[in-house]
Image (tube, grey):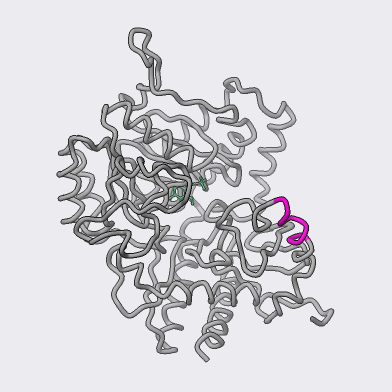
């Protein structure tokens, strides 16, 4: 590649422009499988390693700039390197790093969460969405005395053994849509867990109702993403969530709303406020910590009180622990972020820009005669490339995901991250500008042109 630095939008040769990343990869791959810390970060032929971020942009170690619509997989609602959050963290770590003892600021963070999401009457903090869903499920089982968990196909709730099922898989292993089967997603998970898992199909209300009723006696909870973000961006149809909440209530099945992605992103009250549902429990993560690894689970007081030891029974309670829970630096960032979310001033502009981006992507693909369906809500969205209408999660499997992956990588070569470099939903932040959206649309058009040539 020539020595001139390319601007965002100009086509780069991946290998020529990421030589330092390649050197890092060559030395890292002996130590880290495929040179990365998460299977989601594997990129072919090798990943580009990031050195810094600012606002809506990030830079890799070779100095390439990227306009970012991944935003740390939805974490950075306020953009990269937000000064208010940085200051809060800096002030807190002056006082010591961590104590594994309670600090005053934890209750302040909890109060803010409760004010924005009143269904979180009591909560506990954790360090990742995975931990939040794992603990929420344990609490639900402890409270109800039942062992099974229902989850939607295509729903992602982190990497623990109980939920890494029916996330994605071959049709024959997912089973007939009228009787979906628990489909394992990872080697190393004991098959016995499948006995405790009841898959349902998001947006198939009739099927969901039948399956939940049939298993009601053994189902502790249904855990569900309000917007099925892990299968693109599937929105609830025909009052699906409200109806499902009713069915759960009638059958003594707790409703655990996984708002790890939607919490605060869809507004200070999350998806539950937007759709008018009152979950029994909620899981939060991502935006909650303003960039720090903070998550939470909580809900109805009587359910969360099963965490309080009872001297007369053994085991004495549902157990929850963790050395780093409510890490002071994370709590300081959480409070700073939550105060900004609560004021809510940035949402209208961010959501307007999101409308422009997603509607623009729809217009471009239509003009180019491509079969696509753009789905978005607030500042998150996805483009399904297929001619069949995407209504429920089974339909998302028929989309052309390879095209999404190819688009994402074409974007990387032009300095725009249309979601994950391997293809995922797109996220905006408070730091994105009108110029960013115009540029992204121009680049998207260029990518589609070269892919459909
Ligand atoms: C809806 C949802 N729940 C839970 C998780 C797990 O969160 P974490 O990656 O912090 O463990 C994710 C992660 O993407 C998610 O999207």
Q: Position of residue 412 (x, y in %)?
A: 63, 72
- What residue is rendered at 58% in x and 55% in y? 72
Q: Where is residue 450 in the image (x, y as percent from the top left)?
A: 56, 87
- In the image, is residue 318 above or below residue 444? above
Left or right of 278 in this view: 15: right
Q: Is residue 3 or residue 151 the one in the foreground?
A: 151
- In the image, is residue 59 above or below residue 224? below
Question: What is the span of residues highlighted in magenta in the rendered image?
Answer: 24-31
* Magenta span dominant secondary structure: helix
Q: Residue furthest top?
A: 312
Quadrant of the snapshot with the N terminus: bottom right
Left or right of 100 in this view: 385: left
Q: Which residue lies furthest to the bottom in this view?
A: 453
Query: For residue 175, which quarter of the picture?
Result: bottom left
Q: Position of residue 5 (x, y in %)?
A: 79, 76
Q: Is residue 304 or residue 199 the one in the foreground?
A: 199
Q: Position of residue 198 (x, y in %)?
A: 27, 46
Is 29 within the magenta?
A: yes
């Amino acid at each position: 590649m020539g020595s001139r630095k390319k601007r965002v939008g100009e086509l780069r040769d991946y290998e020529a422009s990421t030589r330092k990343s390649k050197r890092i990869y060559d030395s890292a791959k002996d130590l880290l499988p495929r040179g990365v810390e998460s299977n989601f970060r594997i990129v072919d032929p090798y990943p580009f390693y990031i050195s810094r971020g600012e606002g809506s942009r990030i830079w890799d170690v070779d100095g390439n700039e990227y306009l970012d619509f991944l935003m740390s997989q939805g974490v950075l609602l306020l953009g990269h390197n937000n000064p208010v959050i940085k200051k809060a963290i800096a002030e807190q770590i002056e006082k010591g790093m961590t104590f594994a003892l309670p600090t005053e600021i934890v209750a302040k963070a909890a109060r803010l969460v409760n004010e924005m999401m009143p269904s979180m009457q009591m909560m506990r903090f954790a360090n990742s969405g995975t931990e939040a869903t794992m603990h929420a499920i344990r609490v639900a089982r402890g409270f109800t005395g039942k062992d099974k968990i229902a989850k939607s196909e295509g729903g992602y709730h982190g990497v623990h053994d109980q939920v890494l099922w029916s996330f994605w898989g071959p049709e024959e292993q997912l089973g007939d849509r009228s009787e979906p089967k628990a489909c394992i997603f990872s080697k190393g998970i004991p098959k016995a867990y499948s006995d405790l898992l009841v898959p349902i199909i998001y947006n198939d209300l009739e099927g969901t109702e039948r399956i939940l009723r049939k298993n009601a006696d053994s189902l502790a909870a249904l855990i569900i993403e309000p917007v099925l973000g892990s299968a693109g961006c599937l929105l609830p149809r025909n009052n699906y969530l409200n109806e499902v909440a009713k069915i759960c209530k009638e059958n003594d099945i707790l409703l655990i709303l996984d708002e790890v992605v939607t919490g605060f992103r869809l507004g200070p009250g999350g998806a539950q406020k937007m759709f008018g549902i009152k979950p029994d429990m909620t899981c939060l993560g991502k935006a909650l910590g303003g960039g720090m690894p903070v998550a939470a689970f909580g809900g109805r007081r009587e359910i969360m009180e099963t965490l309080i030891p009872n001297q007369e029974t053994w085991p004495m309670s549902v157990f929850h622990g963790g050395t780093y829970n409510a890490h002071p630096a994370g709590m300081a960032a959480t409070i700073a972020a939550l105060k900004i979310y609560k004021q809510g001033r940035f949402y209208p502009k961010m959501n307007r820009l999101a409308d422009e981006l997603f509607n623009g992507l729809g217009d471009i693909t239509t003009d180019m005669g491509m079969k696509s369906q753009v789905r978005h809500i607030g500042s998150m969205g996805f483009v399904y490339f297929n001619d069949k209408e995407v209504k429920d999660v089974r339909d998302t499997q028929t989309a052309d995901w390879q095209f999404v992956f190819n688009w994402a990588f074409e974007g990387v070569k032009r300095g725009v991250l249309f979601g994950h470099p391997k293809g995922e939903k797109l996220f905006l932040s408070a730091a994105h500008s009108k110029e960013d959206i115009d540029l992204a649309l121009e680049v998207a058009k260029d990518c589609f042109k070269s892919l459909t040539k």
